[in-house]
Image: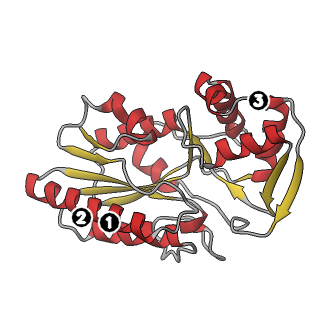
Amino acid sequence: MQIVGNGFLARHFARLADRHDGVVLLAAGVSWAAGTSAAAFAREEALVREVLRRCRADGTRLVFFSTASTGMYGAPGCHGREDELVTPCTPYGRHKRALEQVVGSGGADHLVLRLGHVVGPGHPPHQLLPSLISQVRAGEVTVHRGAARDLIAIDDVVDLVDRLLTLGVRDDVVNIASGVAVPVEAIVDHLERRLGTPATRRFVTGLGANHRVRIDKLRRLLHPRPVAFADDYYQGVLDRYVDSPATAQEAPAL
């Protein structure tokens, strides 16, 4: 496998580098769901088109990471399924959906993976978990009223993608998530317990109350090996993240 990129996803997928010949995994580009930079979007689009051109010429399969965030699946009435017509509701979601269409019509074998909120060591500091931990440690956290997020550990993401590639899944769009919508308030509750630090909550109105991600297709593709995540799966994901040495270095106690 050829891995394009050197960030969070690329580093964790490096353990698959000697597997899956003929696959190019594009793990570079805009990773901030709140981002609205036209220049950053343009750079990612140019990269996607260039890698897609090479894959088409070489006969290799492109794996493109999209998003299953609220930007893609947060619109009212959305059911979080890959086979429904989605209406992205943020600039980031619209950007990723447009790139999905570029990849899908680009003439190369491909696999588009819509990722939930991936959690693991070395997480970029602007992402959800590092931000929440920093806020809890500071004693005040901003919570979008009614918001929920689907958390999944990076090790589970790598394992699931490995299984899909082993089965030869291609020319498809697949959600990679836990399928469990966790209220952000429950995430903050658990972080407070683990960090031993109560925090004042400041509630704001925002996206996310409708957020859900369905993983029925993922389960069907990987049958008969089960894909199942318990309702409290997110607690173990948070525990491993809080306990990792990298997290202690990234967000030292105040």
Q: Is residue 117 left or right of residue 242?
A: left
Task: Name the residue located 76 percent from the left edge and 29 percent from the top edge.
Answer: 253
User: Disc 3 marks which residue?
Assistant: 253
How many C-alpha atoms fall within 10 Å of the one at disc 1: few (<14), some, or many (≥20)?
Answer: some
Badge 3 marks a residue whose secondary structure is loop
Q: Position of residue 58 (x, y in %)?
A: 9, 52
Q: Residue at x 11, y 53 (%)?
A: 59
Q: Residues within 10 Å of mark 3 (few under 14, many from 20)?
A: few
- The location of residue 113, given as percent across then percent down, is 41, 54
Q: Position of residue 114 (x, y in %)?
A: 46, 56
Closer to the eye: label 2 or 3: 3
Q: Is residue 224 visible?
A: no
29 w.r.t. 225: above or below = below
Q: Which residue is mark 1?
A: 45
Alpha carbon separation for disc pair 1 and 3: 38 Å
Q: Nearer the viewer, mark 1 or mark 3?
A: 3
Is 149 or 36 nearer to us in this picture? 36
Q: What's under tag 1, amino acid-wise?
A: Glu
Quarter of the figure with the C terminus: top right
In the rendered image, residue 76, in percent from the top left (x then y), is placed at 66, 76
Q: Is residue 201 left or right of residue 171?
A: right
Image quarter hosting the N terminus: top left
In front: 72, or 132? 132
Vertical position of residue 95 compared to residue 17: above or below: below
Which residue is the site of mark 2? 49
- CB contact under 8 Å: marks 2 and 3: no
Q: Amino acid at mark 3?
A: Ala
Which residue is painted at 85% across and 61% down in the image?
203
